Amino acid sequence: MIGYILTIQQKDKIQGQEYAPFQIFNCVQDINYIWFTFLTDDDKKSIIGTDYEWLLSCPQEEYIPKPSPPFPSNN
Amino acid sequence: MGRFDLRTRTGQISTIIQGQQANFTDTDAQAFFDRVTAAGGTLSDTEKNAVNILTLALKSAGIWTLMKAIYPMVGASAAACAQNLKSSSFTGTFTSGWTYSSNGVTPNGTSAYMNTGLNPVAQSLTSGDSHLSYYARTSATTSDPAEIANFSDSSNAFVLQSKTGVTNRYFYSVGFAASRVVSTAPTGLLNGSAIANTRRDLYVNGVSVANNITTDTATLGNYSLFIGGANLSGTTSGSFTNSQCAFASIGNGLTSSQASDLYSNVQAFQTSLSRNV
């Protein structure tokens, strides 16, 4: 999946911030501990014209998640 | 509970009223519509009628009072889908990464979840009396999808997972999960429930597909439940699903009969919205 790459400062600026009613940003780290955020078309419509529109100009790259699932297996 | 008997006036009327136009609006359904409107969302007449019928059916089946939160996922917006049908509490908050449509809400499977604000411990839900349900319109394809979950450690959790590795499961303690092997993540109404800590069941479309009868006295994760992923110890999120959600509920335990009724009612609701699977 393609996501927007964020610096730590950019991540700190948006993480958990409300960009529309009932909607907040969430950022995740990839396998290399690079911060990403993902915006659907619905999200993009919501942030156009807001203080967060700059996100749409951030570089985009393929996201590779960290490999280990947090839940242990029971089988 | 059987079909309503006109002579004895006993039984469930949902099989009669489902699929029809109710001639009055339930007060709880109306309150939900009002909350959606106040939040800036809109519902079609078809959606309102479907929610009204669902509310009446859940009450008729004796399931309504067991619910802490019901998310019908109607209205094709965050404002509408965040609303809890059961009460004005536990209004959800969506993260970025969701797509909203008349078929429900679809998380991206990478970072998206909805925080329900519902802490099961604070709501007195226990490993002997609780349930989770999620209507999956599509099969999850992520590596470790949790549809509704919080997770602290192996014995402090509350998790409904369509498929991790090859396992479809419901658990409070990982070692005592009601689980089964699947090749693909199931669709339809996924439901985990316990009415005693001596047994928990995993239901798919109202039928128990797995159970575990080892006594589990685990304390549930003491954090807000997430839909579309897991709340990990109240500090981060993970185990994201990409399964489209068209209904979710959290509440007290359901008997096998109530689990069957819940499925019947939810499936009729989805059918009336032309989004059943």
Image (tube, helix red, strand yellow):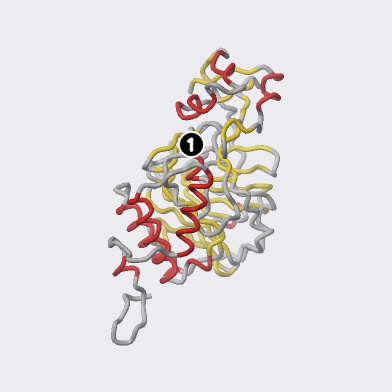
Relative to B157, is A61 above or below?
A: above
Kindly indicate the quadrant of the structure image that contains residue A13: top right
**Which one is nearer the viewer's eye here, B36 or B274?**
B36
**Dot 1: few (<14), some (14–19), or many (≥20) neighbours within 10 Å?**
many
Label 1 chain ID: B
Q: Residue B269 appears at what percent x and percent y?
A: 35, 56
Q: Amino acid at mark 1?
A: Pro
Identify the residue at image location x=54%, y=35%. Answer: B112
Instruction: Look at mark 1 in the image and give the residue it sits on.
Output: B107
Which sits in the foreground, B10 or A51?
A: A51
Picture layout, residue B79 above or below residue B22:
above
Q: Is B36 positioned to the left or the right of A50 in the image?
A: left
The residue lying furthest to the bottom in this view is: B8
Give the quadrant of residue B26.
bottom left
Tell me which residue sits at (51%, 18%) in the image: A62
Residue B43 lies left or right of residue B226; in this view the side is left
Residue at 34% x, 52% y is B270
Q: Quadrant of the N terminus of chain B?
A: bottom left
Q: In the picture shown, does residue B183 fall above or below A60?
A: below
- Residue sitting at x 36%, y 51%: B47
Q: Name the spot of residue B183 as percent of width and height, x first.
A: 39, 43
- Residue B204 to residue B260: above or below: above
Q: Give the tally of numbered discs.
A: 1
Residue B210 occupies quadrant: bottom left
Q: Position of residue B157 (x, y in %)?
A: 63, 52
